[in-house]
Amino acid sequence: MLSFIYNVSQQFEQEHGYGPNTLYMNYAHLECLKQQLNNPTDFEAVTSLLGMELVIVQESIHPSVAWKTEPWKSAVCA
């Protein structure tokens, strides 16, 4: 999972000239990712390692990345 996310991030950066700051994935992807980490229960460690906000979208078929001008955790819903 880490290598897939790395490749998707590198493709994004090559295409846009800057790296992504948001990762979209479903719960199954997240569980696969957590199994590759030393402390899979530490959610902050996951986002810190990735250097991106993590958004869970259950309909997501594959992990995808994007650049958001406002971080997800700081976004205000109307």
Image: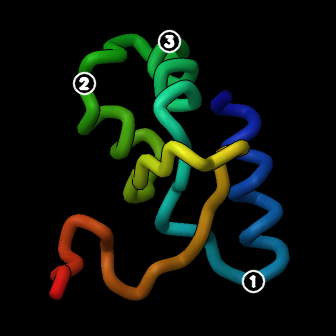
Q: Secondary structure at mark 2?
A: loop
Bin the neighbour count of mark 1 within 10 Å (Cα to Cα): few under 14, some 14-19, many 20 and up.
few
Q: Secondary structure at mark 3?
A: helix
Residue at 73 percent across and 83 percent down: it is 17
Bin the neighbour count of mark 3 within 10 Å (Cα to Cα): few under 14, some 14-19, many 20 and up.
few
- The tag earlier along the polypeptide, 2 or 3, is 3
Q: Secondary structure at mark 1?
A: helix
Amino acid bearing label 1: His
Can you say whether 34 is above or below 23 in the image?
Answer: above
Query: Residue 9, position in %: x, y?
Result: 69, 57
Query: Residue 44, position in %: x, y?
Result: 24, 38
Q: Residue 23 vs residue 3: left or right?
A: left
Q: How is the image coloured?
A: rainbow
Residue at 46 percent across and 80 percent down: it is 68
Can you say whether 65 is above or below 25 in the image?
Answer: below
Amino acid bearing label 3: Gln
- The tag earlier along the polypeptide, 3 or 1, is 1
Disc 2 designates what residue? 42
Pick the front one: 49 or 53: 53
Disc 1 designates what residue? 16
Q: Residue 66 vs residue 8: left or right?
A: left
Quarter containing the N terminus = top right
Q: Which mark is residue 35?
A: 3
Q: Label 2 vs label 3: CA separation?
A: 11 Å
Rendering quarter of residue 13: bottom right
Q: Residue 59 vs residue 6: left or right?
A: left
Label pair 2/1, CB-CB below 8 angstroms:
no
